[in-house]
């Protein structure tokens, strides 16, 4: 297509789908209407997902005490994937006892070097089984295979490698001080990055000499159970890692168990507050990694095409199920029209559909509950008077899918601007001066992450330093690295995970 094609000509070539109007429509991109990608599904034939899983306690898969099970479904097909155990207080108690015994008799007695060898082995085995784990993550959680294959699983291995390296170097991490483990750690993780969140939690805990009882989310338990198989195959001593599956009540049993020394939680601010209340007055240590409503600030001097890519990555990565997603876009007034027009064009090229298809950009919404919640927010946005724009892409008939969505004409007090939607939904506001951008960016109960886009290094430092966010990315977004600490201000939580900082919450220093 030559770039002088008029907008009328472009309209004629489309399949009748509504096209975005653009002030510079002669530059409009229009990939999707000229050709369609053939499907390129990743085969899942070689992946074995058992019909039913028990808890993993003391090195063995164990039936639930009360015999109750739950079902995990594939959100792209709405079909059941597997059954798994529903953990009760008896199961949690058994897991904590196994973890305590392993802590006292084995794990805390090993040298850092020996612990490191086991953790390196876990990392390598995640790499060896990476294809299987990536497919499982996409089947169970709905995320595109491109992301589970290229982000979730390699990063999970990287966190194990990184913390394996620290296991025999804790004396260097804390010079002049002695770092001792805490004991048994209870860890509760969400459904948006199941294996990656497990890695963020288990790798530093083991490196520091602790043992763990971990509960995955009820909608995505399978990769944690496959990780349990890996622990077994790696010969990890029994009881060092225990996985108890179930719903919120099972998580609460872990939080309130008297023999747990530390709680690490990632999830919603609502549940984080419940956990913090339960822990008040106890001597349990805790870290809480909670919600966010990340501001992504774009100045007039930003490289506009790269910025559009960054905005897409910030909000549409993992269907927007990202605590640090750049879900509030602030654009300097002078480039707002042009940027929004280019963003709409780019949204038209995004492919929503089968998570196992290698062409898919946006997979399935993780659960029916989350799908309902996102749709409620779309209605709220429209009722609040905002202007909604959705790409015209096809979406599958079955499964939970949501078109990439942006809202313009929004105000600071709109619920869609203030509340975490956790879906592929972006609000867009404008600003004139850096001070106004900072003021608006910080006007939120959250403070997890944000982005700044500009050509000027001084502006990055000036604005970045004023943003009340645990992480600020400049001219990029959603970049993660095991060496880098991550965590929030305000209602986004307490404590840091990752990097050297991620060792502190798992050690007693004397
Ligand atoms: P939750 O905070 O409810 O879930 C996170 C984890 O905590 C899950 O394993 C959950 O169990 C468990 N849990 C739930 N209730 C309790 C409790 N009382 N005590 C201990 N553990 C508990 O998140 P949801 O899955 O319900 O998602 C709701 C909203 O939270 C999302 O829409 C999103 O806005 C936000 N969220 C934020 C995340 C983040 O990374 N910041 C991650 C996930 C969600 P189970 O799910 O198995 O019932």
Image (cartoon, rainbow, N blue to C red):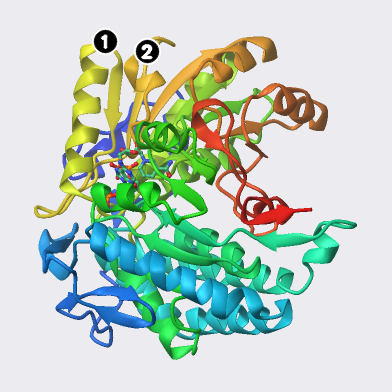
Camera-side residue of 69 and 342: 69
Q: Residues within 10 Å of mark 2 (few under 14, many from 20)?
A: some
Camera-side residue of 7 and 452: 452
Q: Residue at x 16, y 76 (%)?
A: 52
Residue 424: give x, y in percent of width and height.
Answer: 34, 39
Judge whether 479 appears above or below 103 on screen: above
Q: Residue at x 79, y 53 (%)?
A: 510
Camera-side residue of 233 and 3: 233
Residue 130: give x, y in percent of width and height.
Answer: 44, 78
Q: Describe residue 262's horizontal placement relative to residue 368 as left or right.
A: right
Q: Which residue is mark 2?
A: 409
Is the C-beta separation of discs 1 and 2 under 8 Å? yes
Q: Describe residue 180's horizontal placement relative to residue 73 as left or right.
A: right
Residue 259: give x, y in percent of width and height.
Answer: 44, 56
Residue 355 appears in view:
no
Quadrant of residue 503 in the image? bottom right
Q: Residue at x 21, y 34 (%)?
A: 373
In the picture as drawn, the residue positioned furthest to the right comes out as 176
Q: Describe residue 57's horizontal placement relative to residue 292 as left or right.
A: left
Label 2, secondary structure: give it: loop
Q: Which mark is residue 493?
A: none
Q: Which mark is residue 385?
A: 1
Residue 479: give x, y in percent of width and height.
Answer: 60, 51
User: Which quadrant does ligand 1 occupy?
Assistant: top left
Judge whether 509 appears above or below 112 on screen: above
As measured in the structure, the alpha-carbon distance from the residue carrying label 1 to the one carrying label 2 is 8 Å
Label 1, secondary structure: give it: loop
Judge whether 440 appears above or below 390 on screen: above
Quadrant of residue 98 in the image? bottom left
């Amino acid at each position: 297509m030559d770039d002088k094609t008029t907008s009328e000509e472009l309209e004629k070539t489309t399949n009748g789908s509504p096209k975005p109007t653009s002030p510079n429509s002669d530059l409009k991109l229009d990939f999707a209407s000229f050709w369609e990608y053939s499907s390129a599904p990743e085969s899942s034939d070689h992946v074995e997902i058992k019909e039913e899983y028990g808890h993993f306690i003391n090195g063995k898969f164990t039936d639930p005490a009360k015999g109750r099970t739950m079902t995990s479904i594939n959100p792209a097909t709405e079909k059941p994937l597997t059954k798994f155990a529903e953990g009760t207080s008896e199961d949690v108690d058994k897991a904590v006892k196994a973890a305590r015994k392993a802590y006292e008799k084995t794990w805390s007695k090993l040298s850092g070097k020996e612990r490191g060898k086991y953790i390196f082995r876990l990392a390598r085995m995640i790499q060896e089984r990476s294809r299987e784990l990536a497919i499982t993550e996409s089947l169970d959680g709905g995320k595109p295979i491109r992301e589970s294959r290229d982000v979730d699983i390699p990063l999970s291995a990287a966190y194990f490698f990184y913390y394996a390296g620290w296991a025999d170097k804790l004396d260097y991490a804390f010079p002049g001080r002695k770092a001792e483990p805490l004991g048994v750690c209870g860890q509760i993780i969400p459904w948006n990055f199941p294996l990656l969140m497990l890695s963020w939690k288990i790798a530093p805990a083991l490196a520091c000499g602790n043992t763990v009882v971990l509960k995955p989310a009820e909608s995505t338990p399978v990769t944690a159970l496959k990780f349990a198989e890996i622990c077994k195959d790696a010969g990890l001593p029994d009881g060092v890692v225990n996985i108890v599956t179930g719903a919120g009540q099972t998580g609460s049993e872990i939080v309130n168990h008297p023999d747990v020394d530390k709680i690490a939680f990632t999830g919603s601010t609502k549940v984080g507050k419940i956990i913090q209340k339960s822990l008040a007055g106890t001597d349990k240590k805790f870290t809480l990694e909670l919600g966010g409503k990340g501001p992504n600030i774009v100045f007039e001097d930003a490289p506009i095409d790269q910025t559009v890519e960054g905005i897409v990555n910030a909000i549409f990565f993992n269907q927007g199920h990202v605590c640090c997603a750049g879900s509030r876009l602030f654009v300097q007034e002078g480039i707002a029209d042009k940027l929004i027009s280019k963003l709409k064009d780019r949204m038209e090229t995004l492919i929503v559909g089968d998570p196992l298809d290698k062409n898919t950009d946006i997979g399935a919404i993780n659960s029916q509950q989350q799908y309902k919640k996102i749709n409620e927010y779309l209605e709220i946005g429209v009722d609040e008077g905002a202007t909604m724009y959705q790409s015209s892409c096809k979406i599958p008939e079955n499964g939970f899918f949501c078109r990439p969505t942006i809202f313009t004409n929004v105000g600071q007090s709109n619920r869609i601007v203030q509340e975490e939607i956790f879906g592929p939904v972006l609000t867009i506001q404008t600003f004139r001066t850096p001070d106004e951008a900072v003021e608006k960016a910080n006007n939120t109960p959250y403070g997890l992450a944000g982005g700044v886009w500009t050509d000027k290094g001084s502006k990055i430092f000036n604005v970045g330093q004023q943003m009340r966010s645990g992480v600020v990315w400049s001219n990029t977004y959603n970049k993660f690295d095991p060496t880098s600490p991550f965590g929030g201000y305000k209602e986004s939580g307490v404590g840091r995970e990752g990097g050297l900082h991620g060792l502190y919450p798992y050690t007693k220093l004397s």
